[in-house]
């Protein structure tokens, strides 16, 4: 083997952590993890509420828009039927 391979094997070989390593890592993560988790849960709830409210508003907007379009369509249909009715009335009076 080459010297490089020997060095690489040595650097990448498994080594036990120093004494107390696990306890130090856990001590650093425990107090923050609960607080951080609570913040994320609160943020997720707030985001869900905002999305729900936004969805409700959007549906109301879509409902109003659909109502306006329906009223416009009914108005156009009414005017077209009125024209047809006038033409029919003229024909029956001339015949």
Image (cartoon, grey):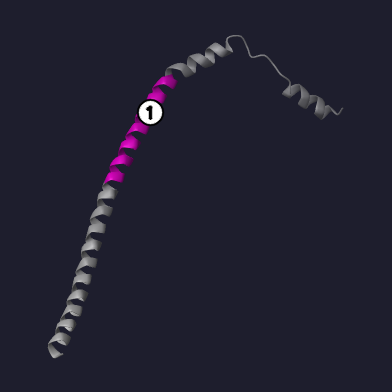
Badge 1 density bin: few <14, some 14–19, many ≥20, Cα 10 Å: few
Q: Residue 9 location, x and y as percent?
A: 77, 24
Q: Residue 78 location, x and y as percent?
A: 19, 71
- Which residue is painted at 19% across and 74% down in the image? 79
Farthest residue, direction top: 19
Q: Secondary structure at mark 1?
A: helix
| Quarter that holds the C terminus | bottom left
Q: Which residue is mark 1?
A: 41
Q: Relative to 46, does residue 62 appear above or below in the rendering?
A: below
- Which residue is painted at 53% across and 16% down in the image? 25
Left-right relation of 89 to 7: left
Question: Observer-nearest residue: 9 or 71?
Answer: 71
| Quarter that holds the N terminus | top right
Residue 11 is one of the magenta-drawn residues: no
Q: Residue 27 location, x and y as percent?
A: 49, 14
State the extent of the magenta-drawn residues as a range: 32-56
- Which residue is painted at 18% across and 82% down in the image? 88
Q: Residue 68 location, x and y as percent?
A: 22, 61
Question: Observer-nearest residue: 8 or 29?
Answer: 29
Q: Quadrant of residue 42?
A: top left
- Which residue is painted at 26% across and 58% down in the image? 66
Q: Quadrant of residue 86?
A: bottom left
Q: Relative to 31, does residue 60 appear above or below in the rendering?
A: below
Residue 33 is one of the magenta-drawn residues: yes
Q: Quadrant of residue 89?
A: bottom left
Q: Relative to 9, does residue 49 appear above or below in the rendering?
A: below
Farthest residue, direction right: 1
Q: Main secondary structure of the magenta part?
A: helix
Left-right relation of 5 to 45: right
């Amino acid at each position: 083997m080459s010297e490089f391979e020997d060095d690489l094997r040595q650097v990448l070989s498994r080594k036990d952590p120093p004494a107390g390593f696990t306890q130090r890592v856990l001590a650093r993560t425990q107090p923050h993890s609960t607080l951080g988790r609570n913040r994320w849960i609160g943020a997720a709830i707030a985001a869900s509420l905002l999305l729900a409210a936004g969805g409700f508003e959007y549906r109301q907007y879509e409902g109003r828009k659909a109502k306006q379009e329906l009223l416009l369509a009914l108005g156009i249909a009414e005017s077209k039927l009125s024209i047809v009715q006038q033409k029919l009335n003229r024909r029956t009076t001339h015949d």
